[in-house]
Amino acid sequence: MAVNAIDVTDLTIAYKDKPVLWDVDMEVPSGTLMAIVGPNGAGKTTMIKSILGLIKPAAGQVLVYGKPYAEQRHLVGYVPQRGSVDWDFPTSVLDVVMMGRYGALGWLKRPGASERAAALDALDKVGMKSFAERQISQLSGGQQQRVFLARALVQDAQLYFMDEPFQGVDATTERAIVTLLQELRSAGKTVVVVHHDLQTVPEYFDWVTMLNVRRIACGPVGDVFTDENLRKAYGGKVAFLSAENGRKS
Amino acid sequence: MSSAQIEIQIIASIVAVACALPGVFLVLRRMAMMSDAISHTVLLGIVIAFFVTKSLNSPLLLVGAALMGVITVVLVELLNRTQLVREDAAIGLVFPAIFSVAVILISRFAGDVHLDTDAVLLGELVFAPFNRLKLFGMDIGPEALYTTGGILLLNLIFVIIFYKELKLATFDPALAAALGFAPTVIHYALMTLVSLTAVGSFDAVGSVLVVAFMIAPPAAAYLLTDRLSRMLIYSALIGIFSAVSGYWLSYLLDASIAGSMATMTGASFLISYLFAPERGLLAQARRRQNQRIEFALTMLTMHIANHTAAQEAEIENEVIHLNEHLKWTPQFAMEVVGTAERAGLVTQRNGLLTLTESGLQRANQEFSN
């Protein structure tokens, strides 16, 4: 059997004495497009950040393609939440996208013509090529998200993590991003997305992890995205959403 | 100009550039106040190192100062992490505590030594040319030229070599960490550099001017460009301008050199704040004014288009009635009509306005929106 893209076992993360993730297991087969869903404070972003080594776990283990993340950095692309950076930073769109190549360049080496070409190519894929020389503060929310996506594309990774890529973007951009994610999956990549809109889960994704501090479920959308699991994850608050889901499936 | 005058200006310019380089990253990281804290707390490092070595010329003084700068940053971050105080308050707690210990130590035990608090705050740029460095008995220039020059070189090399890493760690620390660029290491390296710069510079220019040079030129440059590389260059140039013009201001006013230079950094920022081509106050006001006129033009075309067919056209579209119907002052109405005529949106006959082809287009475009 092929090695999983991600194997998380017994992952526990706590801020002081408050558990954020509690003994969570998660296994993501290679080549899936997976959503992580759960209510606010369920630990979705924490989950991604701990896999990327940005947060130290109190217990548990994370493997990326069978090895610790530090050995597999070059295989992993990351799209943080759009709001996590200062968009007034003095830099251009092209420059931000080129940052995706920094990992491959390593310390001290400067980006050059090939990085530039890769960045322009990625911008073209997200429909932002004409914005290459723009100052990033002039972008709308959807455009910012596309730029971040282009930056992840130039990382040329096998496994992508995206933290709420649909947050505050218009319908056109959401469509464009979904199409792109599905293309990545078709190319054999694995994509993990922190997602909020439960109604689009069955349409966009083929795998889902449901979190609420503990793991509620993890598996193919058809098997685990059920009313019962939704109720477990969200409590009684999603009656209308699960009804919606029932209609779709 | 005497050679002493030239030397003072050169030393001040070197300090200005040396401060501007790390200053740009402090400003972008929203850590401007940290420069104030560090430039004061390094004094305790110097004092302690002085007590250990009993010499004011030991390189250990630099090491002690740099260490104390980093300790300041660590203490602020520890305090901040308790989530009981915010970062600005944490800085306000740590910096006076450390600085005051240094001041007490100096006044109690080092009263007779050349380590006085006035000099620390305001520097002794006037005396810099008198403190010569001699090599094999030859005068090779003021000592401050070499200490500040060394620090400038260090900062320059650091920023050039780690430009890419600094940029990424400042813009997106999470990605920097995920890619393995250790933003924490870069952070503390930068803070060490700020400390070294502060201690190496304040002997020459005083800590107030160090803070002014670190923050004002980058803040001014930030308004002038939207590329990091240009922000660094502009900051350096603005720093040099402030140093040189500040020197001559002090000459004219017969006032403190450091004070005059600090004043000029403030003046440079003010000029940039007012006149920056895109983000300056005036540019913003002009943009708002243009938007107001543009909006009024559209309103005018829509108003005329609405009433063209009707019999009320006579009343509605007369220039003299515009101010009542659109609630414009007569002057503003005249201005808008004039602009509209020049732009070919309307024509006026006997005080009655009619839309041209392009005026009609504009109105229709707005209706369909």
Image: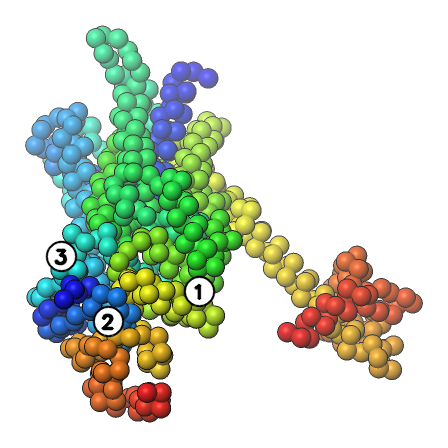
Pointers 1 and 3 in contact (CB under 8 A)? no
Chain for numbered disc 2: A
Q: Nearer the viewer, residue B312 or A98?
A: A98
- Which residue is at the far right? B350
Q: Nearer the viewer, residue A16 or A170?
A: A170
- Image coordinates of residue A47 in percent, x first then y, are 20, 68
- Pointer 1 or 2: first along the chain: 2
Write down the residue under mark 3: A68
- Image coordinates of residue A31 in percent, x first then y, are 26, 66
Instruction: Tell me if A25 is positioned left or right of B329 in this view.
Output: left
Can residue A10 be seen here? The reply is yes
Q: Quadrant of residue B117?
A: top left
Write down the residue under mark 2: A44
Disc assigned to residue A20: none
- Height in image: A164 above or below B116? below
Can residue A41 be seen here? The reply is no
Chain for numbered disc 3: A
Q: Which of marks 3 and 2 is in front?
A: 3
Location of the N terminus of chain A by quadrant is bottom left
Pointers 1 and 2 in contact (CB under 8 A)? no
- Height in image: B14 above or below A45? above
Q: Nearer the viewer, mark 1 or mark 3?
A: 3
Within-10-Å neighbours for mark 3: few <14, some 14–19, many 20+: some
**What secondary structure is found at the residue carrying circle 3?**
loop
Instruction: Tell me if B272 is positioned left or right of A86 in this view.
Output: right
Give the residue type that dot 2 points to.
Lys
- Which residue is at the far top? B137
Q: Quadrant of residue A16?
A: bottom left
